[in-house]
Amino acid sequence: MKAKPVLIDENEVVCTAIRAQGAGGQNVNKVSSAVHLRYDIPASSLPDDVKERLLATSDSRITREGVLVLKAQQHRTQEMNRADALARLQAVVDAAAVVPTVRRATKPSYGSKMRRLEGKSLRSQTKSLRGPVRD
């Protein structure tokens, strides 16, 4: 089911520049190119149903207080990492905006039950013929 896109107010997003991990030569210790994004879900302007679904997910990036924490360090520049983090945040929110379809229990028809039982009895006969020969 297609949900209408939920826009995120950038004033509610807190981005902090940090030094990236991993290899990078001399530059890695001097430049803060990675971005730490924090988004407070309960205090946000998202619709209440989207907030509930976001908080109900078992995502390890959501803290007990309901703050979504994303770290972006894929790119070499801080601006690109910030854009990447915002895009990932939007993807998480869009996934929560989709209303899950309700599963309705169904019953097999009488004919399908009979066909299943007929197949089982045929299989049973086939296997019974494989036994030892009796006099």
Image: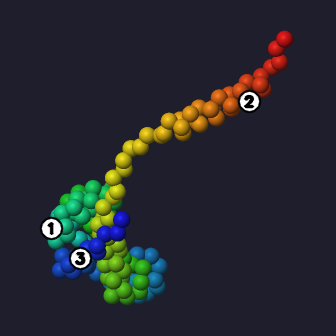
Classify residue 70 by image quadrant: bottom left
* 35 to the left or right of 113: left
Dividing the image into 4 quarters, which one contains the C terminus? top right
Disc sitting over residue 43 in the figure: 1
Q: Which is more toward the observer, 64 or 113?
A: 113
Q: Amino acid at mark 3?
A: Ile
Query: Real-space Cα distance between discs 2 and 1?
Result: 66 Å
Q: Secondary structure at mark 1?
A: loop
Q: Earlier in the sequence, mark 1 or mark 3?
A: 3
Q: For label 2, count other residues whose C-alpha is less than 10 Å away and answer few (under 14), some (14-19) or many (20+).
A: few
Query: Which residue corresponds to the image point at 36% horizontal and 86% vertical from the top-left?
Result: 80
Classify residue 84 by image quadrant: bottom left
Q: Earlier in the sequence, mark 2 or mark 1?
A: 1
Disc 3 versus disc 2: nearer the observer? 2
Disc 2 versus disc 1: nearer the observer? 2
Query: Which residue corresponds to the image point at 20% horizontal and 78% vertical from the top-left?
Result: 9
Please, which residue is most extreme toward the front here? 111
Q: Secondary structure at mark 3?
A: loop
Q: Is residue 108 visible?
A: yes
Q: Amino acid at mark 1?
A: Ala
